[in-house]
Amino acid sequence: MSTAGRRIGFASMALLVGVCVFLLSCLVDPVTRETWWLGNDYAAMSKAPFACLGPFPHRVLGPLLAHVLGLGGDDYWIFHHAVLVLLLASLTGIAVSRGLSWARASLLTLALSLTLGFALFKTFVGYSEPLSFLLMVLALAFVRRSVLFWSLQLLALLNHEHMVFFWPWLLLQRRLAGTSWRADAIGAPAVAAAYVLFRLVVDLGATAQLYTLENQLDWATPSLRMIGMCVLTTIYLLMTYGLMPVLLAWNAASAQRRSAVADIALFLLSLFALCSIALDTFRFVGYALIPTWLAGIRFVQRRHGPLILAALAAATVGAIRLQQRTFAPLVQTIMANQPDPATEIVRKVIPEQPWLFAGVGVAAAAIVALGIVWGRRDRRLGLAPP
């Protein structure tokens, strides 16, 4: 078979797995067939992507793609779910290209699809995050190809500006892949300049825009609010991923390379920095799906890794349900303290419910500790893959 034929076959297999995993995940968390809330704004944009309409005219990529594909307006929900399928297909195909069998890669993708990091966007239809996740995964796949990598970064910014928060982590991935600083010294400023120019043009024509370039650059985050947002982000990570974060700690503790801890720490720092400026933390913690996937690629290669991952995924579904019942009332209490609920977490909510917040800390610490002990044991016994 020719190279082109093999590539088509590989892509077709990945897409088939993506469709099958998506359908299986719908047995646990059904999909919604209409856009919702902010998704309605993106659906409206998709009718005329360059008309600078609505509150987010600068987030043009998703609406533009849907418009070109004929899936704008009332059909935007189809485009949204197609992106979710492509995300699952990419996670599977890239995992196979990194050495996994199709069976192990499919199991890993299915496990991730059962977390709220993925499932949330089957109901939050029309939101921009799934396309951002897909672009980040593709950037990791082409991390050694500088022009393609930075082109994907520009596309990601045109989808949602918060991708810039993850540039430090993505640059680390470039360093670990052995790329040169010279390409990044050209690529990063070029992409930033192109995006700023685009935003300035959009700002001139947008009358209903919620975030202009100027007011985003002027954002300031008081220290109490930052602390409160870190607490809220931790709660949402537990509610979203259940027991799966144990893979992150395991990966850091079991890896032979010293940069593994810095790798995960830099990602979490980027994530918490993003979450410190927006109350939509429940959406943004979805980015943790990606380092969890990277850790999972290593984990399923250990002895009995697939069986353990299957059990962990099943336990995670139950843990997510339990944590939602436990923490959802707490989140409602936090969000009731408008106009600045993040600051009130520190000033009011924690003093009123100290034991519940202590439980959040204990749960997070226990998951991290379990992963560290487990990872060190695997490294000592030679069970951890390279």
Image: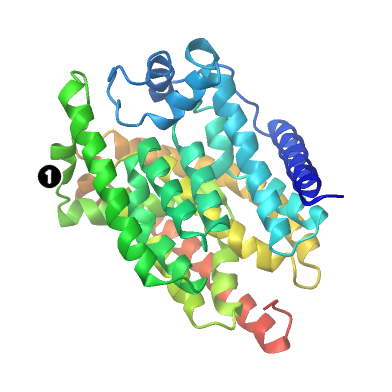
Q: How is the image coloured?
A: rainbow
Q: Residue at x 45, y 29 (%)?
A: 62
Q: Residue at x 62, y 77 (%)?
A: 375
Indicate the quadrant containing the C terminus: top left, top right, bottom left or bottom right: bottom right
**In the image as oriented, which residue stretches furthest toward the front?**
2
Relative to residue 172, is residue 221 drawn left or right?
left
> What's the residue type where badge 1 is placed?
Asp
Quarter occupied by residue 162: top left
Q: Which residue is mark 1?
A: 218
Residue shown at the point (65%, 61%) measured from the top left: 296
Decide: is 303 above or below 33: below
- Foreground pick, 152 / 230: 152
Q: Is residue 276 left or right of residue 71?
A: left
Q: Nearer the viewer, residue 231 or 173?
A: 173
Is disc 1 placed on a helix, strand or loop? loop
What percent of the width, then of the height, locates residue 166? 38, 56
Is any part of residue 104 visible from this angle? yes
Horizontal and vertical percent position of residue 363: 50, 61
**Is 196 situated left or right of 188 in this image?**
left
Q: Position of residue 61 (x, y in %)?
A: 42, 31
Please state the total of marks drawn on the protein image: 1
Tell me where residue 87 appears, x and y as whole percent. 60, 41
Q: Is residue 172 left or right of residue 5?
A: left
| Outermost residue, bottom side | 380
Q: Residue furthest right?
A: 1
Q: Check the image and report above or below for 262 versus 67.
A: below
Counting other residues with Cα less than 10 Å from the Cα at mark 1, is it few (<14), some (14-19), or many (20 or more)? few
- Given residues 62 and 243, the one toward you in this image is 62
Q: List the single residue furthest toward the top.
A: 74
Q: Is residue 373 visible?
A: no
Residue at image location 38% in from the left, 15% down from the top = 48
